[in-house]
Image (cartoon, rainbow, N blue to C red):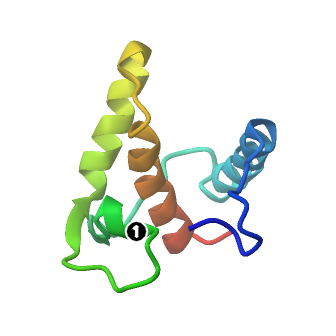
Amino acid sequence: MGSMSGEPLSVSVDELRRAFEVLMRRVETAAGGGDVPLEAEYFWAVPQGEMYDVTGEPGELTIGQLSESWRHVQDVLADEDRAVGYHLVWLADVLRAIGQERPA
């Protein structure tokens, strides 16, 4: 489902990178430059095929695990050649938890 105008959303990679850098500076300041502790470990996840279909309610939810998502992100840091698009999803899991638990 696209935007209200019917046109798909197009996101500027440059703006995305700049927004990420601004937000990460905010997280870094709030964390004092150190680690960001997260209280949650498990979260509800909507199956991929149903996440953006807002014409009906999602079926069965699945359970995600933040430590597992973080391990996948660390794996790509250890070997950048292993990076796949889904690493963005795992990173998003962690970023969502930071944003929801530690709003700036």
Instruction: Assess disc 1: are there few (<14), some (14-19) or many (≥20) residues with their C-alpha within 10 Å of its C-alpha.
Output: few
> Residue 82: where, in percent of width, then height?
35, 19
Q: Return the residue found at the far front.
A: 6
Residue at the disc numbered 1: 51
Above or below: residue 43 compared with residue 58 = above
> Residue 11: where, in percent of width, then height?
73, 48
Which quarter of the image is occupied by the N terminus?
Answer: bottom right
Question: Residue at 31% of width from left, 47% of height from top?
Answer: 69
The residue lying toward the viewer, choosing from 60 and 96, is: 60
Q: Is residue 65 left or right of residue 78?
A: left
Question: Residue at 43% of width from left, 73% of height from top?
Answer: 53
Above or below: residue 87 compared with residue 42 = above
Instruction: Give the quadrant of residue 43.
Output: bottom left
The residue lying toward the viewer, choosing from 72 and 24, is: 72
> Residue 88: where, in percent of width, then height?
47, 42
Q: What residue type is labelled 1?
A: Met
Counting the numbered discs, the total is 1
Q: Is residue 20 left or right of residue 34?
A: right
Which quarter of the image is occupied by the C terminus?
Answer: bottom right
Question: Residue at 39% of width from left, 25% of height from top?
Answer: 76
The residue lying toward the viewer, choosing from 40 and 65, is: 65
Q: In this view, does 80 lie to the left or right of 100?
A: left
Kind of element beneath mark 1: helix
Question: Residue at 35% of width from left, 69% of height from top?
Answer: 50
> Residue 20: where, in percent of width, then height?
69, 47
The residue lying toward the viewer, choosing from 47 and 29, is: 47
Instruction: Give the quadrant of residue 72.
Output: top left
